[in-house]
Amino acid sequence: MSLSRRQLFTLSGGIVSGVGLTACGLALTSPGGSTGALLPSRVPLPAPFVTELPRLTPLRPDRDGRARVTVRRKGIEILPGRTTEIAGYDGLFPGPTIEATKGDPLALTVRNELDVPVVNHLHGGVTRPEHDGYPTDLVQPGREREYRYPLDQRAATLWYHDHAMDRTGPNVYAGMAGAVVLRDPAEVDLGLPRGERELTLVLTDRSFGEDAELVYPVVDGAIDHRYHGGLLGDVMLVNGTPWPRLDVDAARYRLRILNACNARRLELALDPGQDIVQVGTDQGLLTKPHHRSTLTLAPAERADVVIDFSQYGVGEQVTLVNRLGDGAMAQVMRLDVARRATDDSHVPERLSTIERIDPSLVVTTRDFHLALGQPMPGGHGSHSGNDRSLPMWSINGQPYRPGEDLFGAELGTVERWRFTTDVHHPVHAHLVHFQVDQDGAPAWKDTIDIGPTSRAEVLVPIEGFRGRYVLHCHNLEHEDRMMMADFSVG
Ligand SMILES: [Cu+2]
């Protein structure tokens, strides 16, 4: 286990104090509970709930478990009647949704047709280090490489995205993110909604310039320092479409929701209010369903939920809202209950088995403090662009030093990791997963949302592969400004 009541509150719906911290005149928190600063669009914002929610394009591996994507630029319609150039997998934003089966290895070839290097990371995947997307393990322009993913792990909603050193923020913002639905055939028997009533929702916020292009404010190769706390957009996109709408049956739907925003935290709720039934986290199904009125997701977190639209009348319009958003950003999408329908789905009281880790197995306890550090004039590494006269984000006072381990862990052991922060930081580790206590039961996560008033504690089985991996903040502007550390599994 692990999280005290107070910490649980933070993980499942805490709100940062409205007082913005500042350092060196840099705004670090917005009033809405996200760390970062809002970049207003310079184009008229589209009316909400006009465009239909697009289904994501599926990508199914062939019989040999192979699939390929090409990262390329493409002009697509995001704002009605306007063209926006994105840089994404197969020219899509979000990228195609990879449909995979637990235990079936995937060999994903990523071809880079951009003029900048890219790196692919399977977020939440248990992957050998040479295929994991280490930040300097670049795929150069005009090249391609095959990433091998064993996918021998719990079924879950994973995602893939760029992880290039110093450039993850702009690359993901430009479109390099897509969902992975990893299924376990054994879960079909649970009876959860499926087929047309199972949807993946990739949530991203973006800002647009006068020419309808995506704006990522870069000065001399690094993020404009005004946004180094995080870039918050003012257009909410679901599956790449601003504030979409969808006709739904008066029946249960399973929604796999991914917060793929660079920095924005979301507190989702339904209006008119009904319970959201959470059935899964980052790393698959919970042991039992949890009814909640709101659902907080920090960047990179996922939630698997069931919403029963039969609780509403036909003709009723149900808005998915974001309680942490202001103005238009307080809304996400609208679901219009269009028709009565039969529904043979259900949400069983027992969803999965998660063995609670015995805390006496812990061999090492580690403390991590995530905070704004010191400037690093003449600092380490090969990082270009970052203005070294400005403070860098740090872990235990240390800005990222690629190739130098912050710690080493032993394969087959269990560790306890404790985190404290200055402002909100969503912490993510590659390779390993976190066992947390959610609502009194063990649950698996790979990203946890830690606020300035909480102290999170997780149990971490060191499983999978030996080699070097990274632990980092998933606020991408923090990550690019050095809030990352290497660790090696030996
Ligand atoms: Cu952070």
Image (cartoon, rainbow, N blue to C red):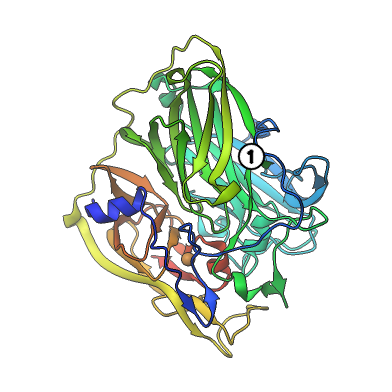
Which image quarter is the C terminus in? Answer: bottom left
Q: Residue at x 67, y 62 (%)?
A: 170
Q: Is residue 105 left or right of residue 186?
A: right
Instruction: Report the residue marked by disc 1.
Output: 243
Asked if residue 134 can be seen in this view, the reply is no
Q: Is residue 248 left or right of residue 433?
A: right
Dot 1: few (<14), some (14–19), or many (≥20) neighbours within 10 Å? many
Whether residue 97 can be seen here:
yes
Say what secondary structure mark 1 lies in: loop
- Residue 29 at what x, y percent from top left? 48, 66
The location of residue 485, given as percent across then percent down, is: 46, 71
* Above-or-below relation of 341 to 405: above
Badge 1 residue CB within 8 Å of ligand 1? no
The part of the image, by quadrant, that contains residue 238 is top right
What's the residue type where badge 1 is placed?
Trp
Spot the residue most to the bottom: 378
**The one of 59 and 448 positioned closer to us in this rendering:** 448
Front one among 478 and 236: 236
Q: Position of residue 171 (x, y in %)?
A: 68, 59
At x 49%, y 53%, the residue is 265
Residue 30 percent location from the top left of the image: 51, 63
Compared to residue 100, the image places residue 401 above or below, namely: below
Write the residue at 57% across / 49% down: 327
Position of 228 compared to 170: left or right? Answer: left
> Which residue in the rendered view is the most extreme toward the front?
327
Residue 304 falls left or right of residue 178: left
Nearest the eye: 310 or 433: 310
Rendered residue at 70%/63% (across/down): 216
